[in-house]
Amino acid sequence: MKEKIRIASGQGFWGDMIDAPVRQVEGGPIDYLMLDYLAEVTMSIMQKQRARDPNAGYARDFVPLMRQILPACVERRIRVVTNAGGVNPHGCAVAVRDVARELGLRVRIATVTGDDIMDRLDDLLARGIELRNMDTGAPLATVRDRVQSANAYLGAWPLVEALRRGAQVVIAGRATDTGLTLAPMIYEFDWKEDDWDRLAAGTIAGHIIECGAQCSGGNCQYQWQTIPDLANVGYPIVEAHPDGTFIVTKHEGTGGRVSVQTVKEQLVYEMGDPREYITPDCIADFTTIRLEDAGPDRVRVFGIKGRPCTDQLKVSISYFAGYKAVGTLVYAWPDAYEKAKAADAILRARLERLGLKFDQILTEYVGVNATHGPLAGEPPPDIPEVQLRVGVRGQDRAAVERFTKEIAPLILTGPPAVTGFAGGRPKVEEVVAYWPSLIPKSEIEPRVELIES
């Protein structure tokens, strides 16, 4: 058993800094590179991509990245664990295999699947598994005909199985963000399935680094002006030990900051009940976490307690919920705010005259109260400019399309001094809504498959 492993975070979401994983691999010693690409809406995007192209449906950025870092990963025995597979882990793995062959590298790649239940929905509903909305209690049957994706969150154990079978690159679909970090710790330290405190520690380690540089100085509220060299921000690394304690740090010579404060800010990200952070692997008690400064850009995390996991898995379901469009105009001094409010009133009157019906019309005054709403109060009379932003949402695409043609006319038929028509005519977009649900673990059978380059 190793005394310590170093797990580096290289991506916090699909679209994160493309060179961050390269810098993690090249910037110093690491044992694992963890890459988190998925969010709830990402699955529906990937499902649409795969519907158009059977070979698509995964994070395309991952493949050219692997072309760049795979030689170094093989040479330095760095193992990659990622959920870049989206709704097509096999397609992603084949693309990486082809890259390895082109580079003349022998690589064992594993796919972890079983999370995608899109094709099983009708059978599940027919057997009385209603997949009720966790927020509203409504059964999925009420929106079944509009569902676009449905994925259960797999935990760390299928990823552990892939590592045990010798995979150097593990490509999963909707695995939990935390599981990507927890799995290497379970594998290397031989933790058991009922070792709740250590599993909770690994889960919290994963939570701290799952959003990339958000725990190493990025998006930091506390004294953000003092964070050094964010242009060269270092992404976080967990130095994990068999007893469940770990250090959060980053490579030397990189910007940003790892401190008790930056780690605390990440800990409260997406936090519900801090005593019950529920994952497929355990329930972690965040109130037991202890943090201490362990040197420059080093925070020690210890004292974590956990409890047994539940017999359910969370399911992320997306469904079509109508159409939307957003238009903007910028009004300049003098009376910028008054002009923007008058333009909004004129626009709403014209939409009503046309008989257009929407589920919602939302107006925001950017530069005045778009962020803080009524708490912002009235702006000063000499405010130099205001952006009027108006959005509509509804079930009738034709009505939303007609709205998009009513923004530009305000330039010459409304209040004066429009200085910006940001983005041109608004585009009609589909609204993708989120349906959180639960499913018995017994209904989900993760599968691990190996592909050799």
Image (cartoon, rainbow, N blue to C red):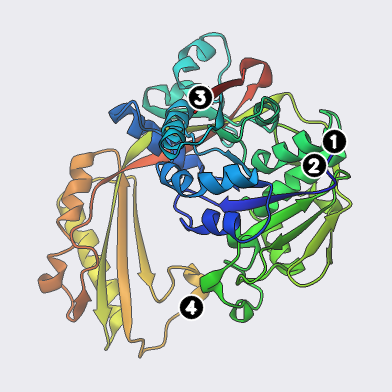
Q: Nearer the viewer, mark 3 or mark 4?
A: 3
Tell me whether the residue at label 2 lies in contact with that at label 4, contact meaning CB atoms closer than 8 angstroms.
no
Circle 1 residue: 196
Circle 3 residue: 116
Label whose residue precedes the other's in the sequence (2 or 3): 3
Label whose residue precedes the other's in the sequence (2 or 4): 2
Cα–Cα gap, marks 1 and 4: 49 Å
Cα–Cα gap, marks 1 and 3: 27 Å
Tell me whether the residue at label 1 lies in contact with that at label 2, contact meaning CB atoms closer than 8 angstroms.
yes
Residue nearest the observer in this picture, 158 or 389 = 158
Name the residue located 50 percent from the left edge and 10 percent from the top edge. Answer: 123
Whether 378 is drawn above or below 312: the answer is below
Cα–Cα gap, marks 2 and 3: 26 Å
Q: Amino acid at mark 3?
A: Asp
Location of residue 125 in the rendering, given as x and y in whole percent from the top left corner: 52, 14
Crowding near pointer 1: few (<14 within 10 Å), some, many (20+)?
Answer: many
Residue nearest the observer in this picture, 196 or 425 = 196
